[in-house]
Amino acid sequence: MAERVALRGYETSLDRAGLALGAGGLLGGAFAAILVAFGGSATAFSVAVGFVIGTVITAMTVVAVAGPLWIVAHALGRRGPVPAMLVGTIAGFALFLGGQTYMFGLYTMPATDTQTLMFRWISAVATSLILAAISALIGLVMWRVAYRRVF
């Protein structure tokens, strides 16, 4: 009985990881399509293009940004839903915050005064928190598709 409890955890396979990547990409594409649809004078074509581009970019981002973080979590035995959401949150927050702040100020920013820069950072953090929550949900769905409990 003790051996069975010690082996409890989650396992995955390469095919389920691929399905999870596809599911995450589709969720990101659906989110992009919703943003395009509510973004103004959207046509069916522009929503479809937004969906396709969002799907491809989300899948590539998951592999490039969240993938290495998840490999570390997986190797450390942190394979549950909370670590999956945490990886999605961290990756999404860092990616979106860096994108809105000229890679955290590493690239040349337009000339602004101190007060404007402060409000730019506050806005970037607030927006990134919202998008990090969506990234956490994508991470949770991907985890659910990829992992099964071992008894």
Image: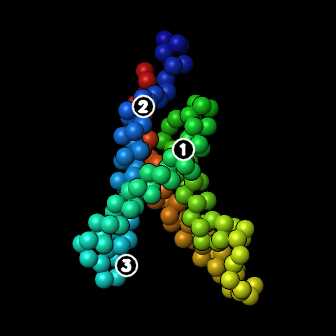
Q: What's the amino acid at mark 3?
A: Gly
Q: What's the amino acid at mark 2?
A: Leu
Which of the 4 image quadrants contains residue 102?
A: bottom right
Q: Residue 48: x and y, percent?
A: 28, 66
Give the mark, 2 or 3, whose residue is nearer the N terminus: 2
Q: Which residue is mark 1?
A: 67
Q: What's the amino acid at mark 1?
A: Gly
Which mark, residue 39?
A: 3
Which residue sits at x=34%, y=82%? Answer: 40
SS of the residue under disc 2: helix
Which of the 4 image quadrants contains residue 113?
A: bottom right
Q: Which residue is mark 2?
A: 14
Which residue sits at x=47%, y=29%? Answer: 10
Of residues 17 and 85, which is closer to you in this image? 17
Neighbour tally class for label 3: few under 14, some 14-19, many 20 plus, Cα within 10 Å? few
Task: Specify whether 67 is left or right of 43.
Answer: right
